[in-house]
């Protein structure tokens, strides 16, 4: 008898829901500090994420296919910064798109 763990159930449910769109991501980002996040890490999708593992590679490619890009990510941080000047935001990504 195989029993699915709570984590496995959660990931299975999330897989059927799909990834959040930009507005949902914005709401999540703005809600994190209010929920007590000390530091927020925000990923910047990249088309060739070779140094990441399969889950991060796949999520970045899904984000790009969904229309997300570095400019939109940076604008999201600018918008967040207007509302919250204190909570640190760390951007996770590759040097290639910045260069």
Image (spheres, helix red, strand yellow):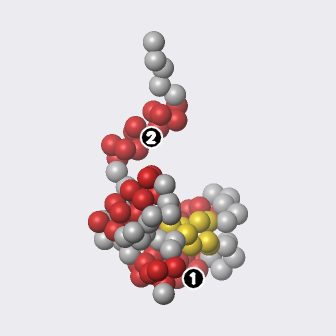
Give percent across and percent down for residue 11. Answer: 44, 40
State the quadrant of the N terminus. Answer: top left
Residue at left offset 45%, top offset 33%: 9
| Closer to us: 65 or 34 | 65
Residue at left offset 38%, top offset 75%: 69
Is 25 above or below relative to 70?
above
Is 73 above or below relative to 41?
below
Marked residue nearer the N-terminal end (2 or 1): 2
C-alpha gap between disc 2 and disc 1: 33 Å
Give percent across and percent down for residue 23. Answer: 39, 67
- Callout 2 touching callout 1 (CB < 8 Å): no
Is residue 79 among what the camera can see? no
Give the side of residue 81 with respect to residue 71, left or right.
right
| Closer to us: 68 or 46 | 46
Q: Mark 2 points at which residue?
A: 11
Q: Name the residue under label 1.
A: 82
Extreme residue in the top direction: 1
Is residue 55 among what the camera can see? yes
At label 2, counting other C-alpha atoms closer than 10 Å, the crowd grade (few under 14, some 14-19, many 20 or more) is few
- Give SS at disc 1: helix
């Amino acid at each position: 008898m195989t029993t699915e763990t709570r984590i496995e159930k959660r990931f299975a449910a999330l897989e059927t829901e799909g990834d959040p769109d930009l507005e949902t991501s914005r709401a999540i980002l703005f809600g994190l500090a209010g929920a007590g996040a000390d530091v927020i890490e925000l990923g910047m999708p990249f088309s060739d994420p070779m140094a990441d593992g399969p889950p991060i590679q796949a999520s970045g490619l899904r984000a790009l296919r969904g229309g997300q890009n570095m400019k939109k990510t940076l604008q999201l941080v600018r918008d967040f910064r207007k509302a919250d000047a204190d909570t640190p935001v760390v951007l996770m990504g590759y040097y290639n798109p910045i260069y």
